[in-house]
Image: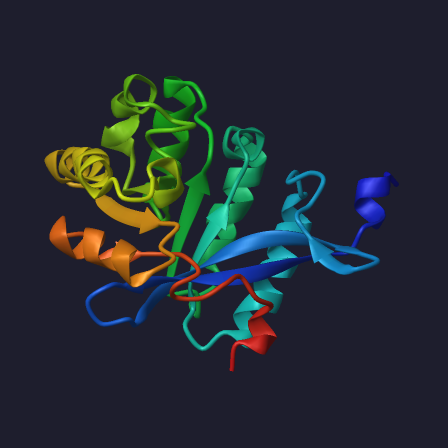
């Protein structure tokens, strides 16, 4: 058993919301590990599927809304056994109303085609996070036909007093998403000013501290 296997892990959750109504659309699962001071970001995100399944079930038991986004690593995404087990979980978990898998980095295009096809066959949707920063236009646009959503972070463009530039850059990615028929989530929303940017650009899905910080599922109610 490795040191990683001996560390206690859990999923925190953060709401992804309808900006127009403030209602929660689904919860993103965010991995944390136990340390002396409490919970922190993990030293590694490479959980086994059995651990992912156990932690998902723990989160589902505490959530009234059974709609989730699961972050996966590229190694997990291209692992056929991991994906097959995730498909089986989705098929055998009727209480799970909706499941997205989210990537912060991109596999090769052949792996995306192959895995997205398998996931989409059971209604699991694929999201790419941090477009425009970690995932630049020339890298990510070829992947758009296999995606359901993209996410853009306000942190990439938040410069005090420079709203025109913010709106231009966020608007570019929103228009690109619309062109490909993709969902678009503006993340890193921290203030009413950020909400105003979203409203001006017709963005209806958001995430960030303005709507809720990551918390343990059992502490939400």
Looking at the image, the residue that sits furthest to the bottom is 221
Looking at the image, residue 61 lies above or below residue 190: below
Q: How is the image coloured?
A: rainbow
Q: Horizontal placement of 141 versus 153: left or right?
A: left
Q: Nearer the viewer, residue 153 or 111?
A: 153
Q: Nearer the viewer, residue 34 or 182?
A: 34
Instruction: Please give the name of the residue rendered at 38% of the width and 19% of the height, measured from the top-left corner.
Output: 110
Q: Horizontal placement of 212 versus 172: left or right?
A: right
Q: Horizontal placement of 119 versus 60: left or right?
A: left
Q: Horizontal placement of 11 versus 194: left or right?
A: right
Q: Quadrant of residue 65?
A: bottom left
- Residue 99 at x, y percent in the picture: 40, 55
- Residue 106 at x, y percent in the picture: 43, 26
- Residue 70 at x, y percent in the picture: 49, 50
Q: Quadrant of residue 128?
A: top left
Instruction: Please give the name of the residue rendered at 81% of the width and 45% of the height, measured from the top-left corner.
Output: 5
Q: Total of numbered circles in the picture?
A: 0
Looking at the image, the residue that sits furthest to the front is 161
- Residue 155 at x, y percent in the picture: 40, 42
């Amino acid at each position: 058993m490795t040191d990683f296997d001996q560390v206690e892990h859990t999923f925190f959750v953060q709401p992804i919301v309808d900006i127009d109504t403030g209602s929660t659309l689904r919860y993103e699962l965010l991995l944390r590990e136990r340390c002396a001071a409490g919970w922190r970001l993990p030293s590694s995100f490479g959980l086994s599927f059995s651990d992912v399944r156990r932690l998902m079930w723990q989160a589902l038991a505490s959530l009234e809304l059974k709609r989730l986004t699961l972050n996966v690593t590229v190694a997990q995404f291209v692992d056929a056994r991991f994906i097959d087990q995730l498909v089986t979980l989705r098929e055998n978990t009727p209480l799970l109303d909706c499941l997205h898998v989210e990537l912060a980095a991109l596999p090769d295009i052949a792996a995306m085609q192959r895995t997205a096809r398998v996931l989409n066959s059971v209604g699991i949707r694929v999201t790419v996070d941090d477009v425009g920063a970690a995932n630049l236009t020339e890298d990510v646009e070829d992947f758009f036909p296999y995606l359901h959503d993209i996410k853009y972070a306000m942190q990439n463009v938040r410069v005090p007093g420079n709203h025109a530039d913010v709106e231009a850059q966020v608007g570019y990615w929103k228009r690109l998403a619309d062109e490909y028929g993709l969902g678009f989530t503006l993340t890193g929303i921290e203030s009413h000013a950020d909400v105003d940017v979203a409203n001006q650009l017709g963005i209806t899905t958001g995430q960030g501290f303005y709507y809720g910080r990551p918390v343990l599922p059992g502490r939400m109610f």
